[in-house]
């Protein structure tokens, strides 16, 4: 456990959230939103300004990110966060302990269930909507059912409300109204969505590109809309730009840890034991040692080959897929480059993201990516080496699965890296997301890549730690 030292911009965030009772924090992933909010939660509880706090979030974030963040820092050890997830029976069991804890998390998919269960006994006076774009579909009539259910308590029972997202308008300004309604009940942008549309949006008659004799109607934003909306929201919305706080000469690196589900962990431990046994009984040599870790890396990523072939594989968990989904969602339409290693990864990624394309030998693929026509590009680091320029297509790189090759790792980063971004005239940071399975070989590979130690040194250290752990009572 470490002592939390706020970054220079985090006190700005915490002061704003404490000062503005209902507000929006629009800052990118990696800015430390969660730890900043934990400080706010702690202050509200200590001052008696909050009784029960509910955090709404995507499933993985509700289940793992929030509870882990509170356990990571010494200052927040007294904040116990209970996820309301799992089966209906599991969720009811957590709510049965509601008097014993202050902070609860729940995924958006279970909101209707929660509202129906609690009814008039709604206990939460503070709501934090993490990834608040999930509320963009709210309308006073019809609209998204989850947001509609939440609206019945949003202003009558909830005294403080915080919206968190890095991308408040993924599809345009029209995404703001639903989120802002939970802040001010339509005071700033219009009491109804129709009023909002009529004030700032219009229609334009356009010729069909294929058949010039046909026309279609296109929704447009009035030229004055953006400036007026920003002016109206500036007192309740805080936005921070990475360019103002980070050195754009270096990528902004975020690591997302996932935990293997219990059954997957059993399979992993069996394979890990076999791996260390083989390493111990044979003379360790870099290439051979790396090869012994293949099965463990496969299991960490979510699938493993069977029957001694490179064609048949079984999926053992989808935790990394879920983590990637959260990154893609927060990217809100910005192109994402995903580095994978195994063919099973590629197949699973294509299944989870049908619009994704693989980086292949076809020059049109690179052209389409750099033209912004590919939302997710799947690339094996070995195929993204020298001479390939991908910086025009995006500035977000995700490492989905891992391998020991340092040069390949560095080369794929360089394809969209800060130097290439500047050379192409892009004044924007490069974001790198590492999806790492906790307590697996993933962590050893990351250590190798970051420290540039030899594979042999990393594995020998891991072997020693493994045996020390085995002999502990």
Image: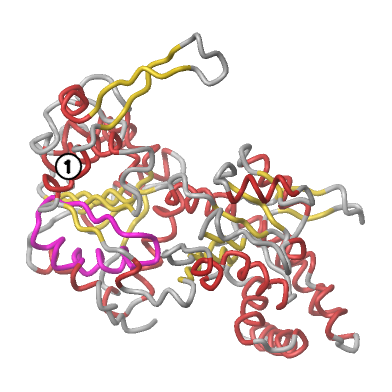
Q: In the image, is residue 391 above or below residue 93?
A: below
Q: Quadrant of residue 310?
A: bottom right
In screen coordinates, is 84 left or right of 160?
Answer: right
Residue plotted at (41% across, 61% down): 65
Nearer to the camera, 120 or 386: 386
Q: Which residues are magenta?
A: 13-41
Residue plotted at (28% across, 38% down): 173
Nearer to the camera, 416 or 122: 416
Residue 95 drawn at (x, y percent): 30, 47
Q: In the image, is residue 280 above or below residue 36?
A: below
* Dot 1: element: helix
Residue 235 drawn at (x, y percent): 10, 53
User: Which part of the image, by quadrant, shows the N terminus?
Assistant: bottom left
Residue plotted at (9% across, 48% down): 159
How many circles with numbers are drawn on the protein? 1
Nearer to the camera, 51 or 223: 223
Residue 124 drawn at (x, y percent): 18, 47
In screen coordinates, is 70 left or right of 319?
Answer: left
Q: In the image, is residue 301 above or below residue 150?
A: below
Residue 42 drawn at (x, y percent): 19, 68
In screen coordinates, is 325 left or right of 242?
Answer: right
Q: Residue furthest front?
A: 212
Q: Residue furthest top?
A: 213
Q: Is residue 429 magenta?
A: no
User: Which part of the image, by quadrant, shows the C terminus?
Assistant: bottom right
Q: In the image, is residue 318 above or below residue 414?
A: above
Q: Quadrant of residue 8?
A: bottom left
Q: Which residue is mark 1?
A: 229
């Amino acid at each position: 456990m470490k002592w939390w030292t706020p970054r220079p911009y985090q006190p700005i965030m915490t002061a704003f959230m404490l000062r503005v009772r209902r507000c929006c924090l629009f800052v990118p992933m990696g800015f430390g939103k969660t730890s900043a909010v934990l400080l706010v939660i702690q202050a509200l509880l200590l001052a008696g300004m909050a009784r029960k706090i509910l955090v709404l979030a995507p499933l993985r974030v509700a289940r793992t990110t929030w509870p882990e963040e509170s356990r990571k820092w010494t200052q927040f050890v007294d904040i116990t966060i209970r996820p309301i997830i799992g089966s209906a029976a599991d969720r009811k069991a957590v709510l049965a302990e509601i008097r014993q804890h202050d902070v609860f998390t729940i995924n958006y998919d279970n909101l209707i269930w929660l509202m129906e269960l609690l009814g008039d006994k709604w206990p939460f006076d503070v709501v934090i909507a993490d990834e608040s774009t999930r509320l963009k579909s709210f309308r006073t009539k019809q609209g998204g059912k989850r947001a509609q259910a939440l609206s019945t308590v949003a202003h009558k029972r909830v005294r403080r409300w915080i919206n968190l997202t890095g991308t408040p308008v993924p599809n345009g300004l029209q995404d703001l109204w639903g989120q802002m309604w939970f802040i001010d009940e339509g005071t700033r942008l219009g009491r109804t969505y129709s009023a909002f549309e009529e004030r700032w949006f219009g229609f334009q008659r356009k010729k069909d590109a294929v058949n010039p004799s046909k026309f279609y109607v296109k929704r447009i934003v009035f030229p004055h809309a953006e400036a007026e909306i920003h002016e109206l929201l500036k007192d309740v919305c805080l936005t921070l730009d990475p360019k103002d706080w980070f050195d754009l000469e270096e990528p902004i690196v975020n690591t997302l840890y996932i935990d293997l589900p219990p059954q997957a962990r059993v399979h992993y431990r069996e394979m890990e034991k076999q791996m260390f046994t083989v390493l111990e009984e044979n003379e360790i040599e870099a290439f051979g040692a790396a090869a012994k870790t293949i099965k463990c890396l496969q299991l960490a990523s979510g699938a493993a080959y069977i029957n001694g072939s490179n064609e048949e594989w079984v999926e053992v968990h989808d935790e990394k897929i879920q983590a990637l989904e959260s990154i893609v969602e927060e990217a809100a339409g910005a192109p994402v480059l995903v580095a994978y290693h195994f063919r099973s990864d590629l197949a699973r990624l294509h299944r989870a993201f049908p619009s994704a394309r693989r980086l292949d030998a076809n020059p049109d693929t690179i052209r389409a990516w750099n033209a912004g026509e590919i939302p997710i590009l799947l690339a094996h680091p070995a195929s993204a080496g020298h001479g390939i320029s991908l910086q025009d297509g995006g500035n977000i790189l995700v490492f989905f699965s891992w391998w020991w090759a340092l040069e390949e790792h560095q080369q794929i980063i360089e394809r969209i890296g800060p130097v290439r971004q500047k050379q192409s005239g892009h004044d924007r940071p490069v974001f790198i997301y590492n999806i790492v399975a906790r307590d697996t070989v993933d962590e050893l590979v990351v250590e190798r890549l970051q420290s540039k130690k030899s594979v042999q040194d990393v594995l020998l250290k891991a072997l020693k730690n493994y045996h020390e752990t085995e002999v502990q009572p």
